[in-house]
Image: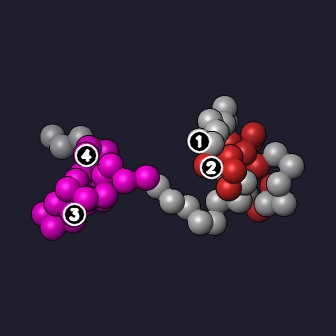
Amino acid sequence: MKTFMDDNFLLNTECAQKLYHDFAENMPILDYHCHINPQEIAENRQFSNITVVVKNRHILGKIVI
């Protein structure tokens, strides 16, 4: 039986698997709409949990967890 979330989760075609594993897998994730201070991203700040990220930010009321 196939594992639910294996290395090819959501990669439904051979082409998708090749593109992801050969090119994108080791690339950084860039989220241009994350509301985190760019300096915190540049410094690779590690947050202990999601509430620390959104604490005192204008999107607090918009977050759905």
Residue that label 1 marks: 44
Q: Amino acid at mark 2?
A: Ile
Q: CA distance from mark 1 to mark 2?
A: 5 Å
**Residue 26: where, in percent of width, then height?**
33, 49
Q: Secondary structure at mark 4?
A: loop
Q: Quadrant of residue 64?
A: bottom right
Q: Residue at x 68, y 42 (%)?
A: 50
Discs 3, 2 touching: Cβ within 8 Å = no
For marks 3 and 2 on the same chain, the one whose residue lies earlier in the sequence: 3
**Residue 15: where, in percent of width, then height?**
15, 67
From this view, report whether residue 11 is shown above or below residue 53. Answer: below
Mark 4 nearby-residue class (10 Å; few <14, some 14–19, many ≥20):
few
Discs 1, 2 touching: Cβ within 8 Å = yes
Residue that label 3 marks: 19
Q: CA distance from mark 3 to mark 2?
A: 26 Å
Q: Amino acid at mark 4?
A: Asp
Q: Quadrant of residue 32?
A: bottom right
Closer to the eye: label 3 or 2 = 2
Residue that label 4 marks: 7
- Specify the segment rendered in magenta: 5-28
For marks 4 and 3 on the same chain, the one whose residue lies earlier in the sequence: 4
Closer to the eye: label 3 or 1 = 1
Q: Tell me, yes or no, whether the highlighted magenta stretch contains residue 62.
A: no
Q: CA distance from mark 2 to mark 4?
A: 26 Å
